Image (tube, grey):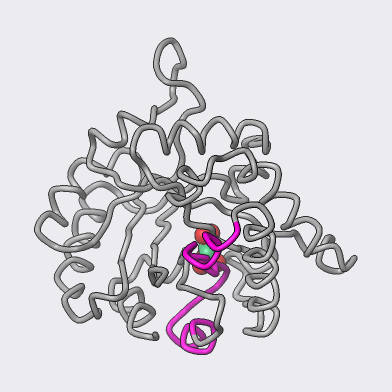
Amino acid sequence: MRKNIVAGNWKMNTTVAEGIELAKAVAAKSSEVPASVKLIIAPPFTHLVPVAEAIKGSCVGLSAQNCADKEKGAYTGEVAADMLVSAGCGYTILGHSERRQYYGETDEKLVVKVKLAIANGLSPIFCVGENLDEREAGRHFDVVSAQVKNVLYTLSAEEMAKVIIAYEPVWAIGTGKTATAEQAQEIHACIRKVVAEKFGDLADEITILYGGSCKPSNAKELFACPDIDGGLIGGASLKADDFIAIALSF
Ligand code: PEP
């Protein structure tokens, strides 16, 4: 049985004090969520250590939003995978479309980051998704399949078993436009098929999240789809009540 996960990507939001307050509120309400649903929060780097302390004793998991493509050394401004583990992280988001778009993150770089994350004990939440032009040109299946193949086909089965995939159509991120449940399901099924072509039955165990304007009002319909195993939540993860309401939508 694959895991259901609801992960909150806080992006570059909240001060440290606000982040601690939000994390405490999520941890306090997390007992309302069935044990079959794993909650994860991904605050900015500066918040990781105090947020780890704030969620201690709850079953909320901690994720970073990125990690370096190097192990350590003279790479000013970067944060390595083992540093994230030492700060309390079990996960890191990798390949978010905002990193691909604004920070030049390529598939080649993501291969290195995904491998380093796994080698250091993190589960990568690996993001894929097409932009509006690609969707309108009917190229979404090809684009997403290529993103999966270029990065995840370089992994061993043992490494792949640690990966969580997030499908996030770029045109739905922060825009208020959500993919319909039908649009999301067909891409999720395609992703699982592409994973199965390389990794066989392991594909059935891989959690595939939907992300893109997911909120309490649309989560139920999305999560009811057979290949959608939860959500990567941006805006709605900044309010503990909305985040928990999404997690209660299974
Ligand atoms: C995201 O960027 O991961 C995301 C899903 O954002 P939003 O929910 O705000 O669209």
Q: Residue at 59% of width from left, 54% of height from top?
A: 199
The image quadrant that residue 239 belongs to is bottom left
Q: Is residue 85 above or below residue 239?
A: above
Q: Quadrant of the C terminus?
A: bottom left
Foreground residue among 187 and 211? 187
Q: Is residue 224 above or below residue 244?
A: below
Q: Residue 146 in the image: x percent, y percent?
A: 75, 50
Q: Residue 247 in the image: x percent, y percent?
A: 35, 78
Q: Is residue 210 magenta?
A: yes
Range shown magenta:
200-223
The image quadrant that residue 213 belongs to is bottom right
Q: Is residue 72 above or below residue 22?
A: above
Residue extending farthest right: 137
Q: Residue at 67% of width from left, 44% of height from top?
A: 101
Horizontally, residue 2 falls left or right of residue 46, namely right
Residue extending farthest top: 74
Q: Residue at 55% of width from left, 63% of height from top?
A: 201
Q: Quadrant of the N terminus?
A: bottom left
